[in-house]
């Protein structure tokens, strides 16, 4: 009985994908990859610089290529993706074909509180004014929801729920 080889965490910026992903990887005794961190490593630029220097379209291309590289990696892994990753190219279908996809559906209040504090590291959020941030984030969430909802499992940031789900899909 085996847990899916690749486990992807998807969801809005600030939903806690990286934190949960690290905890999950530790529990499952496998490596953790953060898609944004891998993009930065390969590009040699931090994400805000990629957006500023070459634009979002090029970032999405990089994101797609690095995601495909991680999918092809010949080892079991937990992979936290950037908030927009499921919504470009056929990324969501690729992730679903490669393993389990977990939508971290954190309450919007928590998300807004978190991203307000770390706006500068997130170019899309950084474009939003503080007084309309909650509304703008909610709009972005609604726009992205159809892709997030393609995930094989949805949880409100609960590690035990994820472990239980993964136990149930062992093959
Ligand atoms: C993005 C989210 C970011 C990062 C990039 C774009 C988005 O990742 O990939 O800034 O489109 O929502 P996090 O979800 O880890 O903040």
Image (cartoon, helix red, strand yellow):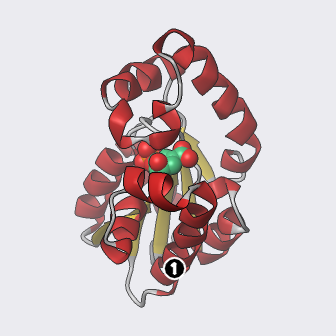
Q: Quadrant of residue 22?
A: bottom left
Q: Where is the C terminus found, in terms of image quarters?
A: bottom right
> In the visual, does 33 lie left or right of 13?
left
Q: Quadrant of residue 101?
A: bottom right
Q: Considering the numbered disc 1 on the image, is that residue within a helix, a strand or a loop?
A: helix
Q: Is residue 102 above or below residue 54?
A: above
The location of residue 4, given as percent across then percent down, is 50, 73
Q: Residue at x 49, y 83 (%)?
A: 69
Disc 1 CB within 8 Å of nearest ligand 1 atom: no
Q: Can residue 81 be seen in this snapshot?
A: no
Q: Residue at x 48, y 73 (%)?
A: 6
Nearer-the-camera pick, 76 or 54? 54
Nearer-the-camera pick, 155 or 33? 33
The location of residue 149, given as percent across then percent down, is 70, 45
Q: Residue at x 35, y 42 (%)?
A: 121
> In the visual, does 50 lie left or right of 44?
right
Q: Residue at x 51, y 79 (%)?
A: 71
Q: Can residue 86 be seen in this snapshot?
A: yes
Q: Is residue 109 above or below residue 5?
A: above
Extreme residue toward the top, this view:
131
Extreme residue toward the bottom, this view:
74
Count of marks placed on residues = 1
Q: Is residue 9 above or below residue 40?
A: above
Q: Is residue 136 above or below residue 126?
A: above
The location of residue 126, given as percent across then percent down, is 45, 32
The residue labelled by disc 1 is 71
The location of residue 112, given as percent across then percent down, is 45, 21
Query: Callout 1: 10 Å neighbours few (<14), some, many (20+)?
Result: many
> In the visual, does 99 lie left or right of 143?
left
């Amino acid at each position: 009985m085996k847990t899916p080889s690749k486990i992807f965490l998807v969801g809005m910026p600030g939903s806690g994908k990286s934190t949960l992903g690290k905890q999950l990887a530790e529990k499952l005794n496998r490596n953790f990859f953060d898609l944004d961190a891998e993009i930065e490593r390969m590009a040699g630029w931090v994400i805000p610089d990629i957006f500023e220097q070459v634009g979002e379209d090029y970032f999405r291309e990089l994101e797609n290529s690095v995601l495909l590289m991680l999918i092809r990696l010949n080892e079991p892994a937990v992979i936290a993706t950037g908030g927009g990753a499921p919504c470009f190219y056929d990324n969501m279908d690729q992730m679903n074909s490669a393993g389990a996809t977990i939508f971290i559906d954190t309450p919007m209040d928590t998300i807004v509180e978190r991203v307000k504090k770390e706006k500068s590291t997130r170019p899309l959020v950084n474009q939003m004014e503080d007084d309309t941030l909650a509304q703008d984030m909610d709009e972005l969430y609604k726009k992205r929801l159809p892709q997030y909802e393609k995930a094989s499992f949805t949880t409100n940031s609960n590690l035990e729920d994820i472990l239980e789900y993964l136990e149930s899909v062992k093959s």
